[in-house]
Amino acid sequence: MKRFNQRDTSHPLRGAAYIRYSSEMQNDSFSLDAQLRQIKEQAERDGVQIIRVYSDPATSAYRKKYRPGINAMREGARRGDFDVLYVHKVDRLARRLEWSLEIVHELQSLNISFKAVEQPFDLGTPEGKLLFHLVSSLGEFYSDNLSKETNKGKLERSTQGYHNGTVPWGYVSQLQGNRMLGVPDPEKAPVVVEMFERYATGAYSDMQIAEWLNAQGFRTNRDHPFGKDTVRDMLCNAYYAGKIRYRGMTVRPKGVSFRSTPPRVSDGQHEAIISEELWQRSQAVRASRRVTVKSIKKTVRINLLQGLVVCSYCGRRLNIQTPKNCATYYRENSHHRGYHDCPYIGQSVRAEVIDAQVADLIRSIHLPVNWEPIVRQMLNEQRTQVDPESERKEIRGVLRLMRENFERGLYQGEEYQYWQKVSTLKEKLALLERVPEPAINRAAQTLLDLRETWENTTQEERKDLVHVMIQEVGVDMAAKCILWVKARPDYEPLFSILSGLRLDGERRYWIEPGETEGNICGVEVDTRQMSTGVEILLPMSHNTLTITEEYIE
């Protein structure tokens, strides 16, 4: 049965808006505010209340299929957050006709209506479908033609010796005549020469040069510490030798990457910082260090927590590392990013150990037979609470103030702490958006079927299950074990009724010591059986978690 047939018709339809502008539209009537205003006016005429707004800023040459705002909208649609999606124009939805069709078909399968304010057509009629295809095709043609003309202009610019985009570190951009040219920065240019000189000796690696730069107090153009990848890109940039490289093409065949084509090299109009001789010496050193990769069949390793596992101390994501013919490890690599504040820098833990712990946790989850009244009671309590709009406004105000202070340079030297705080506030903002009951019911059904599903799935399918339920996993690098997990929004209410987990202010569920038999990160604990008799077992540490019934009257 479709969801519309189940909704309360005494309440207005719930609407969502998706807005986006291109870089050339930032200062005209197609700005985000203008789009949103027109959408709200149309929704009001339709008797629809806009309760969600998804947006994407201008991003030139965005290469992924769907933008972040579109992905967030699709997730909201699957949760049943809204009944109608509004856009300003169809071309705001996607750059390709087939992608627009995929989005609209998905919305229709969820019984969600789609409306373009500037292009009123009815997808329920043959004429409306034809108009949709025509408008989308024209949008795709415009996008492709714009890309072609842009690449043509960039190619001509590089051929004449002018750079495209921002100048690299060590230069400042100055207007000379009617052109912007890169001019060596008097303070940084000698540092660039020293970088190339050091590397050309063959005695320094990219990482060692990055550490030297950070020790001298230098920062990147974005005010971050230098990492080995940043240094490598600089030492491979022919711009410093007075050259302009361009990899683009006037026409790019489908499936061909710009990076897979040989660059076109031209003499630049700017002043070189290093000599041609120094450039050639440094490139010879890099070429000598390249390892020839033999064509061998590699073993495909699937790690359950890839992209989810973080160091519990510093909060940075752990990298996956697989030495030749060895096991896979989760490794703390803050120093490669230019940070040295984590005491576990360079330490690692075997991935199979951590994966086994989270697998045991998930495999042992059981919901009580009366989980539905527990969840329903929670949702009813949420509905009776004061609307959280004031708290949302407060968080948005803090984020706006932090962004302004960041642009003024008040967070210099504390960039990582700034981004951590921003991430935390955004998560709190997301949690203030109430998860609808159907989404929680679907999450609960997944947990109910989890034991049987887990045993009959491949490792890749298990990884997908983990990523559906869990957002982040904190690992104690010293004790080599999991300390806490962070649940996805749909599963948050279910995790919140688990006994044996301690919730902190960052929405992380810590495995509580002192309540179970076994050893969790070196802490001996006892067993406690709750009155429900329903338990979640953690075989990795013989831990027992139980679901409390304190929500039941």
Image (cartoon, helix red, strand yellow):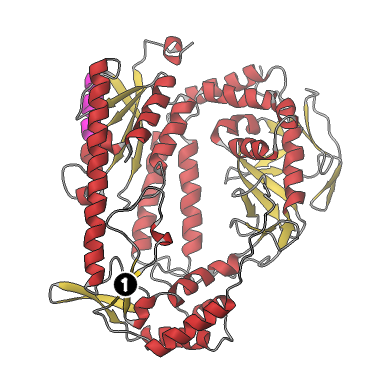
**Residue 239 lies in what quarter of the image?**
bottom left
Residue drawn where x is 16% and y is 46% of the image:
28
Classify 507 as above or below 77: below
The secondary structure that most of the magenta stretch takes on is helix
Q: Position of residue 352 (x, y in %)?
A: 75, 50
Classed neighbour count for the residue bearing mark 1: other residues with Cα under 10 Å, few (<14), some (14–19), many (≥20): some
**Disc 1 element:** loop
Residue located at (51% from left, 55% from top): 420
Q: In which quarter of the image is the C terminus?
A: top right
The answer to whether residue 299 is left or right of residue 285 is: right
Q: What residue type is labelled 1?
A: Val
Residues rendered magenta in the picture: 36-45
**Membership of 425 in magenta stretch:** no
Q: Is residue 106 visible?
A: yes
Whole-percent x, y for residue 48 in the image: 30, 21
Q: Where is residue 129 in the image (x, y as percent from the top left)?
A: 27, 21
Q: Is residue 386 visible?
A: no
Q: Residue 207: percent from the left, percent from the top?
A: 56, 75
Q: In this view, does 453 lie above or below 325?
A: above
Number of marks present in the image shown: 1
The structure residue drawn at horizontal position 20% and vertical position 48%, both measured from the top left corner, is 25
Of residue 512 and residue 495, the one placed in the foreground of this image is: 495
Residue position marked by numbered label 1 in the rendering: 167
Residue 167 figure quarter? bottom left
The stretch drawn in magenta includes residue 44: yes
Q: For this view, does 108 lie left or right of residue 48?
A: right
